[in-house]
Amino acid sequence: MANNHKIFYRFCVVILFILTLIALLPLVLIMMASITDEDTLLANGYAFIPAKFSTAAYLYLIKQHSTILRAYGISFAVTGIGTFLSVLFTTMIAYPMSAKNFKYRNMLTFFVFFTMLFNGGVVPSYLLWSSTLHIKDTLWALILPNYLVTAFNVILVKNYYSTNVPDALLESARIDGANEIVIFFKIMLPLAVPVVATIGLFTALVYWNDWINGLYYISNPNYYGIQNLLIRLMDNIQFLKSGAAGSSLGALSVKLPGTAVRMAMAVTGILPIVITYPFLQKYFIRGVVIGAVKG
Amino acid sequence: MGNKKNIPSWQFLFLALPGIVYLIVNNYIPMLGIFLAFKDFNFSKGIFGSAWCGFDNFKFLFKTSDAILMTRNTILYNLAFIVLGTILAIFVAILMSELGASLKLKFFQSSLLLPNLLSWVVIAYICFAFLNSESGFINKTINRWLQIESVSWYTEKQAWPGILIFVFLWKNAGYTSIVYLASISGIDKSVYEAADIDGASKLRQIFSITLPLLKPTVIIMTLMAVGRIFFSDFGLFYQVPMDSGALYSVTQTIDTYVYRGLMKLNDVGMSAAAGLFQSVVGFVVVMLANGIVRKTDSDNALF
Protein backbone atom coordinates (compact mmCIF):
# COMPACT_ATOMS: atom_id res chain seq x y z
CA MET A 1 0.00 0.00 0.00
CA ALA A 2 2.60 2.53 1.09
CA ASN A 3 4.70 1.51 -1.88
CA ASN A 4 1.78 2.06 -4.22
CA HIS A 5 1.40 5.60 -2.87
CA LYS A 6 5.07 6.32 -3.30
CA ILE A 7 5.01 5.27 -6.94
CA PHE A 8 1.96 7.41 -7.60
CA TYR A 9 3.59 10.37 -5.85
CA ARG A 10 6.69 10.04 -8.04
CA PHE A 11 4.52 9.77 -11.13
CA CYS A 12 2.80 13.06 -10.17
CA VAL A 13 6.08 14.86 -9.64
CA VAL A 14 7.52 13.66 -12.95
CA ILE A 15 4.45 14.66 -14.98
CA LEU A 16 4.24 18.06 -13.26
CA PHE A 17 7.92 18.59 -13.94
CA ILE A 18 7.37 17.92 -17.65
CA LEU A 19 4.39 20.29 -17.73
CA THR A 20 6.46 22.95 -15.98
CA LEU A 21 9.14 22.60 -18.65
CA ILE A 22 6.48 23.08 -21.33
CA ALA A 23 5.23 26.19 -19.51
CA LEU A 24 8.63 27.78 -19.01
CA LEU A 25 10.84 26.69 -21.92
CA PRO A 26 9.19 29.01 -24.48
CA LEU A 27 10.19 31.92 -22.24
CA VAL A 28 13.73 30.56 -22.01
CA LEU A 29 13.84 30.35 -25.81
CA ILE A 30 13.16 34.05 -26.34
CA MET A 31 15.58 34.97 -23.57
CA MET A 32 18.33 32.90 -25.19
CA ALA A 33 17.48 34.31 -28.63
CA SER A 34 17.90 37.82 -27.29
CA ILE A 35 21.51 37.07 -26.33
CA THR A 36 22.37 35.18 -29.52
CA ASP A 37 24.64 36.59 -32.18
CA GLU A 38 22.53 37.80 -35.11
CA ASP A 39 24.36 35.81 -37.82
CA THR A 40 24.15 32.64 -35.74
CA LEU A 41 20.45 33.29 -35.24
CA LEU A 42 19.86 33.61 -38.96
CA ALA A 43 21.94 30.55 -39.84
CA ASN A 44 20.86 28.14 -37.10
CA GLY A 45 17.53 29.56 -36.11
CA TYR A 46 16.36 30.14 -32.54
CA ALA A 47 18.04 27.73 -30.17
CA PHE A 48 18.07 27.03 -26.45
CA ILE A 49 21.85 26.88 -26.39
CA PRO A 50 23.20 29.36 -28.92
CA ALA A 51 26.44 28.56 -30.74
CA LYS A 52 27.57 32.13 -30.29
CA PHE A 53 26.46 34.62 -27.65
CA SER A 54 26.21 38.34 -28.21
CA THR A 55 24.98 41.31 -26.26
CA ALA A 56 24.56 43.36 -29.44
CA ALA A 57 20.77 43.38 -29.19
CA TYR A 58 20.77 44.88 -25.69
CA LEU A 59 23.52 47.34 -26.58
CA TYR A 60 21.37 48.41 -29.50
CA LEU A 61 18.36 48.87 -27.21
CA ILE A 62 20.47 50.97 -24.85
CA LYS A 63 21.56 53.12 -27.78
CA GLN A 64 17.92 53.60 -28.79
CA HIS A 65 16.85 54.12 -25.19
CA SER A 66 14.75 57.23 -25.75
CA THR A 67 11.94 55.40 -27.59
CA ILE A 68 12.02 52.50 -25.14
CA LEU A 69 12.19 54.57 -21.97
CA ARG A 70 9.34 56.66 -23.23
CA ALA A 71 7.17 53.57 -23.84
CA TYR A 72 8.16 52.23 -20.42
CA GLY A 73 7.18 55.55 -18.87
CA ILE A 74 3.79 55.48 -20.58
CA SER A 75 3.16 51.89 -19.46
CA PHE A 76 4.14 52.66 -15.86
CA ALA A 77 2.06 55.84 -15.77
CA VAL A 78 -1.00 54.11 -17.23
CA THR A 79 -0.62 51.15 -14.87
CA GLY A 80 -0.13 53.39 -11.83
CA ILE A 81 -2.90 55.91 -12.51
CA GLY A 82 -5.29 53.26 -13.84
CA THR A 83 -4.85 50.94 -10.88
CA PHE A 84 -5.13 53.75 -8.32
CA LEU A 85 -8.35 55.15 -9.77
CA SER A 86 -9.77 51.70 -10.37
CA VAL A 87 -9.25 50.59 -6.78
CA LEU A 88 -10.59 53.87 -5.38
CA PHE A 89 -13.76 53.97 -7.50
CA THR A 90 -14.38 50.24 -7.10
CA THR A 91 -14.25 50.30 -3.30
CA MET A 92 -16.26 53.53 -3.20
CA ILE A 93 -19.17 52.08 -5.16
CA ALA A 94 -18.93 48.70 -3.38
CA TYR A 95 -19.52 50.17 0.09
CA PRO A 96 -23.04 51.55 -0.57
CA MET A 97 -23.92 48.24 -2.25
CA SER A 98 -23.05 46.43 0.98
CA ALA A 99 -24.60 48.98 3.36
CA LYS A 100 -27.87 47.61 4.75
CA ASN A 101 -29.20 51.07 5.54
CA PHE A 102 -28.80 52.47 2.04
CA LYS A 103 -32.26 52.74 0.52
CA TYR A 104 -31.23 52.18 -3.11
CA ARG A 105 -28.71 49.42 -2.59
CA ASN A 106 -30.61 46.79 -4.58
CA MET A 107 -31.11 49.18 -7.43
CA LEU A 108 -27.42 50.07 -7.42
CA THR A 109 -26.41 46.40 -7.29
CA PHE A 110 -28.58 45.62 -10.30
CA PHE A 111 -27.18 48.64 -12.13
CA VAL A 112 -23.65 47.32 -11.67
CA PHE A 113 -24.53 43.69 -12.22
CA PHE A 114 -26.41 44.19 -15.48
CA THR A 115 -23.20 45.29 -17.20
CA MET A 116 -21.98 41.69 -16.83
CA LEU A 117 -24.92 40.35 -18.78
CA PHE A 118 -25.21 42.69 -21.72
CA ASN A 119 -22.93 45.04 -23.55
CA GLY A 120 -23.38 47.31 -26.51
CA GLY A 121 -20.38 45.93 -28.33
CA VAL A 122 -17.20 47.47 -29.62
CA VAL A 123 -18.63 49.75 -32.32
CA PRO A 124 -20.83 52.07 -30.24
CA SER A 125 -18.22 52.36 -27.50
CA TYR A 126 -15.46 53.08 -30.01
CA LEU A 127 -17.52 55.87 -31.58
CA LEU A 128 -18.43 57.28 -28.16
CA TRP A 129 -14.86 57.41 -26.86
CA SER A 130 -13.32 58.59 -30.10
CA SER A 131 -15.78 60.94 -31.80
CA THR A 132 -17.86 62.21 -28.88
CA LEU A 133 -15.37 62.26 -26.00
CA HIS A 134 -12.26 62.79 -28.17
CA ILE A 135 -9.85 60.74 -26.12
CA LYS A 136 -7.82 59.53 -29.10
CA ASP A 137 -4.08 60.07 -28.71
CA THR A 138 -4.20 61.06 -25.05
CA LEU A 139 -3.05 59.18 -21.97
CA TRP A 140 -6.72 58.83 -20.97
CA ALA A 141 -7.34 56.61 -24.01
CA LEU A 142 -5.14 54.01 -22.37
CA ILE A 143 -6.77 54.35 -18.94
CA LEU A 144 -10.49 54.97 -19.31
CA PRO A 145 -12.04 52.53 -21.81
CA ASN A 146 -13.01 49.06 -20.60
CA TYR A 147 -11.05 48.44 -17.42
CA LEU A 148 -11.51 51.20 -14.85
CA VAL A 149 -14.56 49.93 -12.96
CA THR A 150 -15.69 46.39 -13.73
CA ALA A 151 -18.73 44.68 -12.26
CA PHE A 152 -16.59 41.65 -11.46
CA ASN A 153 -14.25 43.62 -9.15
CA VAL A 154 -17.06 45.65 -7.59
CA ILE A 155 -18.97 42.50 -6.65
CA LEU A 156 -15.80 40.94 -5.25
CA VAL A 157 -15.29 43.91 -2.91
CA LYS A 158 -18.98 44.14 -2.06
CA ASN A 159 -19.03 40.47 -1.00
CA TYR A 160 -15.89 41.04 1.02
CA TYR A 161 -17.54 43.93 2.86
CA SER A 162 -20.76 42.00 3.44
CA THR A 163 -19.02 39.02 5.00
CA ASN A 164 -16.08 40.60 6.82
CA VAL A 165 -17.26 43.88 8.31
CA PRO A 166 -19.51 43.58 11.37
CA ASP A 167 -22.50 45.95 11.38
CA ALA A 168 -21.80 46.82 15.02
CA LEU A 169 -18.55 48.50 14.01
CA LEU A 170 -20.33 50.81 11.58
CA GLU A 171 -23.18 51.47 14.00
CA SER A 172 -20.82 52.60 16.73
CA ALA A 173 -19.02 54.91 14.30
CA ARG A 174 -22.38 56.41 13.32
CA ILE A 175 -23.32 56.92 16.95
CA ASP A 176 -20.03 58.77 17.37
CA GLY A 177 -21.26 61.10 14.68
CA ALA A 178 -19.24 59.95 11.68
CA ASN A 179 -20.92 60.37 8.33
CA GLU A 180 -20.75 57.69 5.61
CA ILE A 181 -17.99 59.40 3.70
CA VAL A 182 -15.78 59.53 6.77
CA ILE A 183 -16.71 55.93 7.59
CA PHE A 184 -15.65 54.86 4.13
CA PHE A 185 -12.24 56.51 4.23
CA LYS A 186 -11.49 55.85 7.90
CA ILE A 187 -12.94 52.35 8.31
CA MET A 188 -14.03 50.64 5.12
CA LEU A 189 -11.02 51.46 2.94
CA PRO A 190 -8.42 50.33 5.51
CA LEU A 191 -10.42 47.17 6.22
CA ALA A 192 -10.48 46.31 2.54
CA VAL A 193 -6.69 45.99 2.25
CA PRO A 194 -6.65 42.22 1.55
CA VAL A 195 -9.22 42.41 -1.22
CA VAL A 196 -7.75 45.66 -2.53
CA ALA A 197 -4.38 43.92 -2.82
CA THR A 198 -6.01 41.23 -4.93
CA ILE A 199 -7.99 43.41 -7.32
CA GLY A 200 -5.16 45.95 -7.44
CA LEU A 201 -2.67 43.30 -8.49
CA PHE A 202 -4.89 41.94 -11.24
CA THR A 203 -5.90 45.40 -12.44
CA ALA A 204 -2.26 46.44 -12.62
CA LEU A 205 -1.55 43.36 -14.70
CA VAL A 206 -4.46 44.17 -17.02
CA TYR A 207 -3.15 47.71 -17.59
CA TRP A 208 0.45 46.61 -18.06
CA ASN A 209 -0.55 43.93 -20.58
CA ASP A 210 -3.19 45.93 -22.41
CA TRP A 211 -2.63 46.68 -26.08
CA ILE A 212 -6.24 46.78 -27.26
CA ASN A 213 -6.96 50.34 -26.13
CA GLY A 214 -3.73 51.37 -27.83
CA LEU A 215 -4.76 49.57 -31.00
CA TYR A 216 -8.10 51.39 -31.15
CA TYR A 217 -7.28 54.80 -29.80
CA ILE A 218 -3.58 55.56 -30.29
CA SER A 219 -2.05 56.52 -33.62
CA ASN A 220 0.59 58.94 -32.31
CA PRO A 221 3.72 56.86 -31.48
CA ASN A 222 4.48 59.24 -28.59
CA TYR A 223 1.69 57.52 -26.67
CA TYR A 224 2.79 53.96 -27.32
CA GLY A 225 3.16 51.90 -24.18
CA ILE A 226 5.47 48.91 -24.17
CA GLN A 227 2.87 46.53 -25.68
CA ASN A 228 1.99 48.77 -28.58
CA LEU A 229 5.66 49.45 -29.22
CA LEU A 230 6.13 45.67 -29.44
CA ILE A 231 3.30 45.40 -31.97
CA ARG A 232 4.88 48.14 -34.03
CA LEU A 233 8.33 46.53 -33.88
CA MET A 234 6.98 43.25 -35.17
CA ASP A 235 5.92 45.03 -38.37
CA ASN A 236 8.89 47.31 -38.61
CA ILE A 237 12.08 46.94 -36.66
CA GLN A 238 13.41 50.21 -38.08
CA PHE A 239 10.77 51.96 -36.02
CA LEU A 240 13.15 52.11 -33.07
CA LYS A 241 15.32 54.41 -35.15
CA SER A 242 12.85 56.24 -37.33
CA GLY A 243 10.22 56.47 -34.62
CA ALA A 244 9.23 59.31 -32.39
CA ALA A 245 12.61 60.29 -31.11
CA GLY A 246 15.24 58.83 -33.41
CA SER A 247 16.82 60.48 -36.42
CA SER A 248 15.82 58.65 -39.56
CA LEU A 249 18.89 59.46 -41.61
CA GLY A 250 21.65 56.87 -41.60
CA ALA A 251 19.40 54.24 -40.06
CA LEU A 252 19.99 51.88 -42.95
CA SER A 253 23.75 52.20 -43.02
CA VAL A 254 24.14 50.45 -39.67
CA LYS A 255 23.53 46.73 -39.74
CA LEU A 256 20.58 46.05 -37.53
CA PRO A 257 20.46 42.87 -35.39
CA GLY A 258 16.72 42.78 -36.13
CA THR A 259 15.77 39.31 -34.98
CA ALA A 260 17.64 39.40 -31.71
CA VAL A 261 16.49 42.98 -31.03
CA ARG A 262 12.86 41.92 -31.36
CA MET A 263 13.34 39.20 -28.80
CA ALA A 264 15.30 41.51 -26.53
CA MET A 265 12.37 43.94 -26.65
CA ALA A 266 9.93 41.17 -25.76
CA VAL A 267 12.15 40.25 -22.80
CA THR A 268 12.25 43.91 -21.79
CA GLY A 269 8.44 43.96 -21.91
CA ILE A 270 8.01 41.04 -19.51
CA LEU A 271 10.87 42.06 -17.23
CA PRO A 272 8.74 43.83 -14.59
CA ILE A 273 6.47 40.78 -14.36
CA VAL A 274 9.32 38.27 -14.16
CA ILE A 275 11.16 40.33 -11.53
CA THR A 276 8.19 40.88 -9.22
CA TYR A 277 6.59 37.47 -9.74
CA PRO A 278 8.57 35.53 -7.10
CA PHE A 279 7.38 38.02 -4.46
CA LEU A 280 3.81 38.29 -5.71
CA GLN A 281 3.02 34.74 -6.81
CA LYS A 282 1.20 33.79 -3.63
CA TYR A 283 -1.12 36.79 -3.97
CA PHE A 284 -1.78 35.90 -7.58
CA ILE A 285 -2.67 32.33 -6.65
CA ARG A 286 -4.89 33.52 -3.78
CA GLY A 287 -6.54 35.98 -6.16
CA VAL A 288 -7.37 33.28 -8.70
CA VAL A 289 -9.13 31.27 -5.98
CA ILE A 290 -11.07 34.26 -4.60
CA GLY A 291 -12.13 35.32 -8.09
CA ALA A 292 -13.36 31.88 -9.04
CA VAL A 293 -15.25 31.15 -5.84
CA LYS A 294 -17.52 34.13 -6.16
CA GLY A 295 -17.27 36.31 -9.20
CA MET B 1 -31.95 49.03 11.64
CA GLY B 2 -33.88 51.50 13.79
CA ASN B 3 -31.98 54.50 12.51
CA LYS B 4 -32.50 53.62 8.85
CA LYS B 5 -34.19 56.93 8.07
CA ASN B 6 -31.47 58.99 9.75
CA ILE B 7 -28.84 58.23 7.17
CA PRO B 8 -29.19 60.46 4.19
CA SER B 9 -28.81 58.60 0.91
CA TRP B 10 -26.78 61.43 -0.58
CA GLN B 11 -23.68 60.38 1.33
CA PHE B 12 -23.87 56.91 -0.19
CA LEU B 13 -24.70 58.32 -3.59
CA PHE B 14 -21.72 60.64 -3.34
CA LEU B 15 -19.44 57.65 -2.77
CA ALA B 16 -21.00 55.67 -5.61
CA LEU B 17 -21.00 58.62 -8.01
CA PRO B 18 -17.65 58.10 -9.82
CA GLY B 19 -18.47 54.45 -10.39
CA ILE B 20 -22.00 55.23 -11.58
CA VAL B 21 -20.81 57.90 -14.00
CA TYR B 22 -18.13 55.58 -15.34
CA LEU B 23 -20.52 52.67 -15.92
CA ILE B 24 -23.00 54.99 -17.64
CA VAL B 25 -20.32 56.20 -20.04
CA ASN B 26 -18.43 52.96 -20.53
CA ASN B 27 -21.34 50.51 -20.51
CA TYR B 28 -24.84 52.01 -20.66
CA ILE B 29 -24.47 54.65 -23.38
CA PRO B 30 -22.89 52.07 -25.75
CA MET B 31 -25.90 49.82 -25.04
CA LEU B 32 -28.11 52.59 -26.38
CA GLY B 33 -25.77 52.81 -29.35
CA ILE B 34 -26.91 49.46 -30.66
CA PHE B 35 -29.19 51.36 -33.03
CA LEU B 36 -26.06 51.92 -35.15
CA ALA B 37 -26.57 48.39 -36.46
CA PHE B 38 -29.71 49.65 -38.17
CA LYS B 39 -28.03 52.63 -39.83
CA ASP B 40 -26.12 53.07 -43.05
CA PHE B 41 -23.29 54.72 -41.17
CA ASN B 42 -21.26 57.38 -42.87
CA PHE B 43 -18.43 59.14 -41.03
CA SER B 44 -19.11 62.49 -42.71
CA LYS B 45 -22.78 62.44 -41.71
CA GLY B 46 -22.11 61.28 -38.16
CA ILE B 47 -24.05 59.07 -35.80
CA PHE B 48 -27.35 60.90 -36.01
CA GLY B 49 -27.05 62.18 -39.58
CA SER B 50 -26.62 58.78 -41.17
CA ALA B 51 -29.69 57.27 -42.80
CA TRP B 52 -31.67 54.38 -41.31
CA CYS B 53 -31.50 51.17 -43.29
CA GLY B 54 -33.60 48.74 -41.29
CA PHE B 55 -32.19 45.23 -41.28
CA ASP B 56 -30.04 45.76 -44.38
CA ASN B 57 -26.76 45.38 -42.48
CA PHE B 58 -27.91 42.05 -41.09
CA LYS B 59 -29.16 40.90 -44.49
CA PHE B 60 -25.79 41.67 -46.07
CA LEU B 61 -23.91 40.12 -43.19
CA PHE B 62 -25.76 36.83 -43.29
CA LYS B 63 -25.73 36.66 -47.09
CA THR B 64 -21.94 36.41 -47.05
CA SER B 65 -20.12 33.32 -45.93
CA ASP B 66 -18.35 35.50 -43.31
CA ALA B 67 -21.18 35.29 -40.80
CA ILE B 68 -21.37 31.51 -40.78
CA LEU B 69 -17.60 31.17 -40.80
CA MET B 70 -16.91 33.47 -37.86
CA THR B 71 -19.80 32.09 -35.81
CA ARG B 72 -18.69 28.53 -36.51
CA ASN B 73 -15.08 29.32 -35.58
CA THR B 74 -16.08 31.13 -32.39
CA ILE B 75 -18.30 28.31 -31.17
CA LEU B 76 -16.08 25.39 -32.20
CA TYR B 77 -12.93 26.88 -30.66
CA ASN B 78 -14.80 27.63 -27.45
CA LEU B 79 -16.12 24.07 -27.30
CA ALA B 80 -12.61 22.70 -27.78
CA PHE B 81 -11.29 25.06 -25.09
CA ILE B 82 -14.03 24.05 -22.66
CA VAL B 83 -13.62 20.30 -23.14
CA LEU B 84 -9.82 20.07 -23.39
CA GLY B 85 -9.23 22.90 -20.93
CA THR B 86 -11.37 21.25 -18.27
CA ILE B 87 -9.78 17.83 -18.73
CA LEU B 88 -6.23 19.19 -18.60
CA ALA B 89 -6.95 21.46 -15.61
CA ILE B 90 -8.52 18.65 -13.59
CA PHE B 91 -5.63 16.34 -14.50
CA VAL B 92 -3.09 18.92 -13.31
CA ALA B 93 -5.12 19.69 -10.17
CA ILE B 94 -5.24 16.00 -9.22
CA LEU B 95 -1.48 15.67 -9.70
CA MET B 96 -0.95 18.76 -7.56
CA SER B 97 -3.29 17.60 -4.82
CA GLU B 98 -0.95 14.64 -4.27
CA LEU B 99 1.87 16.96 -3.28
CA GLY B 100 0.10 18.40 -0.25
CA ALA B 101 1.02 21.89 0.94
CA SER B 102 4.70 21.74 0.07
CA LEU B 103 7.38 23.85 -1.50
CA LYS B 104 7.15 21.62 -4.58
CA LEU B 105 3.49 22.48 -4.99
CA LYS B 106 4.24 26.20 -4.80
CA PHE B 107 6.96 25.86 -7.42
CA PHE B 108 4.79 23.92 -9.88
CA GLN B 109 1.78 26.13 -9.29
CA SER B 110 3.57 29.40 -9.85
CA SER B 111 5.46 28.06 -12.87
CA LEU B 112 2.27 26.88 -14.54
CA LEU B 113 0.51 30.18 -13.76
CA LEU B 114 3.26 32.33 -15.27
CA PRO B 115 2.13 32.05 -18.94
CA ASN B 116 -1.24 33.41 -17.81
CA LEU B 117 0.38 36.68 -16.79
CA LEU B 118 1.87 37.44 -20.21
CA SER B 119 0.17 39.67 -22.74
CA TRP B 120 -0.98 38.27 -26.09
CA VAL B 121 1.57 40.51 -27.75
CA VAL B 122 4.44 38.83 -25.93
CA ILE B 123 2.89 35.42 -26.57
CA ALA B 124 2.72 36.28 -30.27
CA TYR B 125 6.46 36.99 -30.12
CA ILE B 126 7.08 33.64 -28.44
CA CYS B 127 5.01 31.85 -31.09
CA PHE B 128 6.96 33.72 -33.76
CA ALA B 129 10.20 32.37 -32.30
CA PHE B 130 8.84 28.86 -32.81
CA LEU B 131 6.89 29.23 -36.05
CA ASN B 132 8.73 31.79 -38.16
CA SER B 133 9.60 30.03 -41.43
CA GLU B 134 13.21 31.20 -41.89
CA SER B 135 14.65 30.87 -38.40
CA GLY B 136 11.87 29.46 -36.19
CA PHE B 137 12.72 26.75 -33.69
CA ILE B 138 10.33 24.24 -35.25
CA ASN B 139 11.60 24.54 -38.82
CA LYS B 140 15.27 24.97 -37.97
CA THR B 141 15.61 22.48 -35.15
CA ILE B 142 12.73 20.06 -34.77
CA ASN B 143 11.98 19.58 -38.47
CA ARG B 144 15.69 19.28 -39.20
CA TRP B 145 16.03 16.49 -36.65
CA LEU B 146 13.00 14.72 -38.01
CA GLN B 147 14.22 15.46 -41.54
CA ILE B 148 10.91 17.07 -42.49
CA GLU B 149 10.68 19.93 -44.98
CA SER B 150 10.28 23.43 -43.57
CA VAL B 151 6.71 24.60 -43.28
CA SER B 152 5.52 28.13 -43.87
CA TRP B 153 3.41 28.14 -40.70
CA TYR B 154 1.77 31.53 -41.08
CA THR B 155 0.10 30.45 -44.34
CA GLU B 156 -0.56 26.82 -43.40
CA LYS B 157 -4.26 26.74 -42.58
CA GLN B 158 -4.58 23.13 -41.42
CA ALA B 159 -2.09 23.63 -38.62
CA TRP B 160 -3.85 26.52 -36.91
CA PRO B 161 -6.75 24.92 -35.08
CA GLY B 162 -4.14 22.78 -33.33
CA ILE B 163 -1.77 25.69 -32.72
CA LEU B 164 -4.49 27.94 -31.30
CA ILE B 165 -5.82 25.23 -29.02
CA PHE B 166 -2.30 24.47 -27.79
CA VAL B 167 -1.53 28.14 -27.13
CA PHE B 168 -4.82 28.56 -25.29
CA LEU B 169 -4.11 25.57 -23.07
CA TRP B 170 -0.53 26.72 -22.50
CA LYS B 171 -1.75 30.09 -21.28
CA ASN B 172 -4.79 29.00 -19.27
CA ALA B 173 -4.31 25.49 -17.87
CA GLY B 174 -2.34 26.72 -14.84
CA TYR B 175 -5.01 29.26 -13.96
CA THR B 176 -7.94 26.86 -14.18
CA SER B 177 -6.10 24.09 -12.35
CA ILE B 178 -5.73 26.40 -9.32
CA VAL B 179 -9.51 26.69 -9.18
CA TYR B 180 -9.96 22.91 -9.32
CA LEU B 181 -7.20 22.34 -6.78
CA ALA B 182 -9.02 24.65 -4.35
CA SER B 183 -12.09 22.52 -4.85
CA ILE B 184 -10.17 19.25 -4.30
CA SER B 185 -8.61 20.67 -1.11
CA GLY B 186 -12.13 21.17 0.20
CA ILE B 187 -12.84 17.43 0.09
CA ASP B 188 -12.90 15.79 3.53
CA LYS B 189 -9.59 13.90 4.03
CA SER B 190 -11.23 11.16 6.08
CA VAL B 191 -13.01 9.90 2.95
CA TYR B 192 -9.62 9.07 1.42
CA GLU B 193 -8.38 7.53 4.68
CA ALA B 194 -11.40 5.25 4.77
CA ALA B 195 -10.76 4.27 1.14
CA ASP B 196 -7.14 3.49 2.01
CA ILE B 197 -8.22 1.18 4.80
CA ASP B 198 -10.57 -0.56 2.39
CA GLY B 199 -7.59 -1.10 0.10
CA ALA B 200 -8.74 1.14 -2.76
CA SER B 201 -5.92 2.01 -5.17
CA LYS B 202 -5.01 5.63 -5.93
CA LEU B 203 -6.57 5.41 -9.37
CA ARG B 204 -9.70 3.92 -7.88
CA GLN B 205 -9.89 6.78 -5.34
CA ILE B 206 -9.59 9.38 -8.11
CA PHE B 207 -12.42 7.87 -10.14
CA SER B 208 -14.69 7.02 -7.21
CA ILE B 209 -14.08 9.96 -4.87
CA THR B 210 -12.30 12.96 -6.40
CA LEU B 211 -14.04 13.15 -9.77
CA PRO B 212 -17.60 12.64 -8.48
CA LEU B 213 -17.03 15.27 -5.78
CA LEU B 214 -15.62 17.70 -8.35
CA LYS B 215 -18.76 17.45 -10.46
CA PRO B 216 -20.50 20.57 -9.06
CA THR B 217 -17.40 22.72 -9.72
CA VAL B 218 -17.07 21.30 -13.24
CA ILE B 219 -20.72 22.04 -13.97
CA ILE B 220 -20.48 25.63 -12.72
CA MET B 221 -17.21 26.37 -14.51
CA THR B 222 -18.51 24.84 -17.73
CA LEU B 223 -21.79 26.71 -17.67
CA MET B 224 -19.96 29.98 -17.03
CA ALA B 225 -17.78 29.25 -20.05
CA VAL B 226 -20.78 28.24 -22.15
CA GLY B 227 -22.34 31.59 -21.27
CA ARG B 228 -19.42 33.23 -23.12
CA ILE B 229 -19.47 30.89 -26.08
CA PHE B 230 -20.15 33.69 -28.58
CA PHE B 231 -17.19 35.71 -27.32
CA SER B 232 -13.59 34.98 -28.15
CA ASP B 233 -10.26 36.15 -26.86
CA PHE B 234 -9.36 38.84 -29.40
CA GLY B 235 -5.62 38.60 -28.68
CA LEU B 236 -5.44 34.86 -29.29
CA PHE B 237 -7.11 35.10 -32.68
CA TYR B 238 -5.62 38.41 -33.82
CA GLN B 239 -2.07 38.63 -32.38
CA VAL B 240 -0.97 35.00 -32.35
CA PRO B 241 -1.69 34.38 -36.08
CA MET B 242 -0.03 37.78 -36.81
CA ASP B 243 -3.17 38.97 -38.60
CA SER B 244 -2.22 36.68 -41.50
CA GLY B 245 -4.81 36.94 -44.27
CA ALA B 246 -4.15 33.41 -45.52
CA LEU B 247 -5.41 32.08 -42.18
CA TYR B 248 -8.67 34.02 -41.87
CA SER B 249 -10.86 31.02 -42.64
CA VAL B 250 -9.61 29.27 -39.48
CA THR B 251 -8.79 32.30 -37.29
CA GLN B 252 -11.69 34.69 -37.94
CA THR B 253 -14.01 34.96 -34.94
CA ILE B 254 -16.81 37.43 -34.28
CA ASP B 255 -14.44 39.66 -32.31
CA THR B 256 -11.76 39.82 -35.01
CA TYR B 257 -14.43 40.42 -37.65
CA VAL B 258 -15.85 43.37 -35.70
CA TYR B 259 -12.36 44.84 -35.27
CA ARG B 260 -11.41 44.44 -38.93
CA GLY B 261 -14.75 45.80 -40.12
CA LEU B 262 -14.50 48.85 -37.90
CA MET B 263 -10.81 49.74 -38.02
CA LYS B 264 -9.52 48.31 -41.31
CA LEU B 265 -12.50 48.38 -43.68
CA ASN B 266 -14.41 51.28 -42.13
CA ASP B 267 -17.59 49.30 -42.54
CA VAL B 268 -19.25 50.54 -39.38
CA GLY B 269 -22.74 49.25 -40.18
CA MET B 270 -21.71 45.63 -40.78
CA SER B 271 -19.38 45.70 -37.83
CA ALA B 272 -22.13 47.03 -35.57
CA ALA B 273 -24.52 44.39 -36.88
CA ALA B 274 -22.04 41.60 -36.08
CA GLY B 275 -21.44 43.13 -32.64
CA LEU B 276 -25.16 43.37 -31.90
CA PHE B 277 -25.69 39.80 -33.07
CA GLN B 278 -22.96 38.74 -30.63
CA SER B 279 -24.37 40.78 -27.73
CA VAL B 280 -27.95 39.60 -28.15
CA VAL B 281 -27.19 35.93 -28.70
CA GLY B 282 -24.59 36.13 -25.93
CA PHE B 283 -27.19 37.61 -23.57
CA VAL B 284 -29.67 34.84 -24.34
CA VAL B 285 -27.01 32.16 -23.76
CA VAL B 286 -25.91 33.72 -20.44
CA MET B 287 -29.51 33.79 -19.23
CA LEU B 288 -30.05 30.17 -20.26
CA ALA B 289 -26.78 29.02 -18.66
CA ASN B 290 -27.60 30.85 -15.45
CA GLY B 291 -31.10 29.40 -15.44
CA ILE B 292 -29.60 25.92 -15.58
CA VAL B 293 -27.09 26.68 -12.80
CA ARG B 294 -29.87 28.04 -10.61
CA LYS B 295 -31.87 24.84 -11.09
CA THR B 296 -28.93 22.55 -10.23
CA ASP B 297 -27.22 24.59 -7.54
CA SER B 298 -28.70 27.95 -6.67
CA ASP B 299 -25.73 28.99 -4.47
CA ASN B 300 -23.49 29.14 -7.47
CA ALA B 301 -25.88 30.92 -9.83
CA LEU B 302 -24.78 34.39 -10.89
CA PHE B 303 -28.18 35.73 -9.87
Image (cartoon, coloured by chain):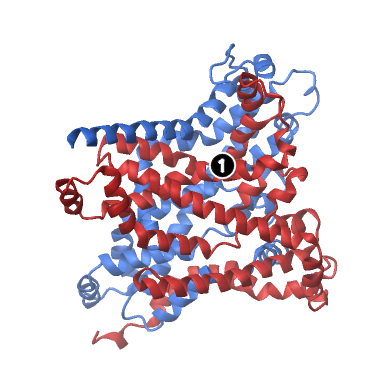
Q: Is residue B285 above or below residue A49?
A: below
Quick one: which residue is furthest to the front in this view?
A: B199
Which image quarter holds the C terminus of chain B?
bottom left
Residue A148 image position (x, y, % from top left): 52, 59
Rendering colour (chain A): blue
Residue A122 image position (x, y, % from top left): 66, 62
Which residue in the structure is indicated by mark 1?
Answer: B167
Kindly state the secondary structure of the residue where label 1 is placed.
helix
The answer to whether residue B3 is visible is yes
**Image mark 1: chain:** B
Give the number of marks: 1
Q: Residues within 10 Å of mark 1 (few under 14, many from 20)?
A: some
Amino acid type at mark 1: Val
Rendering colour (chain B): red
Q: Is residue A293 left or right of residue B61?
A: left
Give B82 or A110, whichever is nearer the viewer.
B82
Q: Is residue B115 left or right of residue A144?
A: left
Residue A80 image position (x, y, % from top left): 49, 48
Question: Residue, x 47% and y 64% (percent of image)?
Answer: B223
Give B199 or B247, whichever is nearer the viewer.
B199
The answer to whether residue A137 is visible is no
Which image quarter holds the N terminus of chain B?
bottom left
Give B4 or A152, whichever is nearer the viewer.
A152
Question: To which quarter of the image does residue A246 belong?
Answer: top right
Q: Is residue B84 left or right of residue B184?
A: right
Residue B131 image position (x, y, % from top left): 65, 32
